[in-house]
Image (cartoon, rainbow, N blue to C red):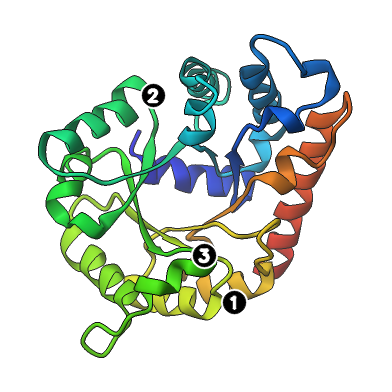
Amino acid sequence: MHFMQSLQNAWNRNQSLVCVGLDPEPAKFPAQLQGRRDAVFEFCRDIVDATADLVCTFKPQIAHFAALRAEDALERLIAHIHDKHPGVPVILDAKRGDIGSTAQHYASEAFERYRADAVTLNPYLGRDSIAPFLERADKGVILLCRTSNPGGADFQALDCGGAPLYLRVAETIARDWNAHGNCALVTGATWPEELGKVRTVVGDMPLLVPGIGAQGGDVAAVLRHGLAAGGDGLMISSSRAILYAGSGEDFAQAARAAAQALRDDINRHRR
């Protein structure tokens, strides 16, 4: 199924705009998983199983797995999501961006090796660096636009012919790159008014919104500025605040409670 259709279905079925980021840090795992050979997979699997009916997507961060030499765990995790929770799409948070044949290999990595439904990408090398991803019409192409980190303004806010660069990026992607309707943008919760400017430019294009939770983004402001016309259009991402909501044997139940609290908070503001 097309990523965008899966996302729309999950928004509706689970009544949720929540994206759970899967960023494993073994030092934060509960005691019963410490030292276990397959702890990375087991931790993430249990979080997934506890929250799958509360989310619109999962977003594993590839660096957290690669740094632990746990790419195999990532492959098995995505396969587990597809097998046990069909209909919940998976975004591989990789922020790839390179030229020519290298971009082709990155596309194969995301969509064939890991079997992700979408991938985050850096657009700043231009369209040819993104073309191998755009050509996969059934896959989501989620491009950095106005990121949540404090240093994002160093370049993204620079004047570019009367508008900041991030808006020029949004305009170009919406106008020229989205022929298959498979593009989305990363816009940080920490800059809600700028998120609103992006929404004005791109219409109902989905926005992946990191920065809620540990980074301090405000749910009400994000929804006020970022909701699409149909009352959805957002994937509001939270990682640490959900993953590490508990540190005991009931860590998965604590994660579920945190995910449900975020979903319910979002839905109160949606109404």
The residue at the point 49 percent across, 66 percent down is 230
Residue 144 visible in the shown view: yes
Quarter holding the N terminus is top left
Question: Label 3: how many residues lie within 10 Å, few (<14), some (14-19) or many (20+)?
Answer: many
Secondary structure type for disc 3:
loop
The residue carrying mark 1 is 224
The disc labelled 2 sits on which kind of residue? Tyr
The residue at the point 46 percent across, 71 percent down is 229
Among all residues in the image, which is located at the extreme bottom? 162
Name the side, left or right, on which 96 lies relative to 127: right
Name the side, left or right, on which 220 lies relative to 200: right
Dot placed on the residue nearer the N-terminal end, 2 or 1: 2
Q: Is residue 132 above or below residue 195?
A: above
The disc labelled 3 sits on which kind of residue? Gly
31 vs 223, nearest the viewer: 31
The x, y position of residue 31, in whole percent, is 84, 21
**How many angstroms separate mark 2 from mark 3 (CA)?**
26 Å
57 vs 87, nearest the viewer: 57
The x, y position of residue 137, in whole percent, is 22, 41
Secondary structure type for disc 2:
loop
The residue carrying mark 2 is 114
Q: Nearer the viewer, mark 2 or mark 1?
A: 2
**How many angstroms separate mark 2 from mark 1 (CA)?**
35 Å
Q: Are marks 2 and 1 in contact (CB under 8 Å)?
A: no
The x, y position of residue 58, in whole percent, is 55, 38
The disc labelled 1 sits on which kind of residue? Arg
The residue at the point 17 percent across, 48 percent down is 129
Quarter location, residue 191? bottom right
Name the side, left or right, on which 198 lies relative to 138: right
Checking the image for residue 188, the label placed there is 3
Secondary structure type for disc 1:
helix
Dot placed on the residue nearer the N-terminal end, 2 or 3: 2
